[in-house]
């Protein structure tokens, strides 16, 4: 019997909100994941450091947001590697060589994925699930990453097979209509 895939959701969670919880639930259901690792990063290299609440506060808030969710583990990204997602993934894959991982991200992140450090390496390491976000479908589906890896796209009806596919493979998953945004919550004060 094969091991259930584990989802990886990284982010600054500045602050975490109900939309993050719903994203985790949606991804676990659509991908038949055995669990989810929620990695809270100290700082997103693409954002200003001054915008961040302390890491310990964001971890505590993320734990509270995910409370009661079965097989969902919150950890600082520093526990599994440096700030860059590619380095964290390498470390996870080395620590758990038999575990099938799927990197989970919102459509807003996938639209900008080509700006990430060594994003092509991430695509080559693990399959990626792109979860819909209102207003980002077109940007995500026509992004640099979507065009560069068009041959690796898995149809949503086959999302449950994503963990069995060799990278690069990715799938766009519809159905999450949450509008919460950490940026909007911060700006609202």
Image: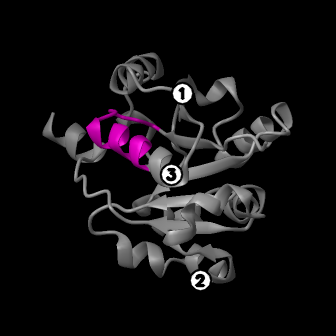
User: Which image quarter holds the N terminus?
Assistant: top right
Q: What SS does tag 2 mark?
A: helix
Checking the image for residue 147, the label placed there is 2
**Residue 51, percent across and down?**
36, 36
Instruction: Say which of marks 1 and 3 sits in front.
Output: 1
Asked whether disc 3 touches disc 2, contact meaning CB atoms under 8 Å apart, the reply is no
Residue 84, above or below 105? above
Left or right? Give the position of 180 relative to 30: left
Circle 1 residue: 71
Q: What SS does tag 3 mark?
A: loop
Circle 3 residue: 46
Residues in magenta? 12-26
Which comes before the other along the chain, label 2 or label 1?
A: 1
Which comes before the other along the chain, label 1 or label 3?
A: 3
Q: Considering depth in this image, is 40 or 65 the residue closer to the camera?
A: 65
Q: Residue at x 56, y 24 (%)?
A: 75
Which comes before the other along the chain, label 3 or label 2?
A: 3
**Residue 153, percent across and down?**
61, 76
C-alpha gap between disc 3 and disc 2:
22 Å
Asked whether disc 1 touches disc 3, contact meaning CB atoms under 8 Å apart, the reply is no
């Amino acid at each position: 019997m094969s091991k259930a895939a584990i989802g990886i959701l990284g982010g600054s969670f500045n602050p975490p909100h109900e939309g993050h919880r719903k994203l985790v639930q949606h991804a676990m259901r659509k991908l038949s994941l055995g669990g989810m690792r929620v990695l809270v990063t100290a700082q997103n290299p693409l954002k200003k450091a001054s915008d961040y609440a302390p890491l310990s506060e964001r971890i505590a808030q993320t734990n509270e947001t995910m409370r009661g969710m079965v097989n969902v583990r919150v950890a600082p990204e520093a526990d599994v590697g440096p700030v860059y997602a590619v380095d964290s993934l390498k470390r996870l894959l080395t620590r758990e060589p038999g575990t099938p991982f799927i990197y989970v991200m919102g459509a807003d992140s996938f639209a900008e994925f080509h700006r990430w450090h060594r994003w092509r390496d991430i695509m080559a390491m693990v399959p990626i699930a792109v979860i819909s976000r209102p207003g980002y479908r077109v940007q995500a589906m026509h992004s640099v990453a979507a065009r560069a890896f068009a041959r690796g796209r898995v149809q949503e009806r086959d999302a449950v097979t994503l963990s069995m596919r060799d990278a690069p493979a990715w799938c766009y998953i519809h159905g999450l209509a949450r509008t919460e945004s950490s940026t909007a919550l911060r700006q609202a004060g």
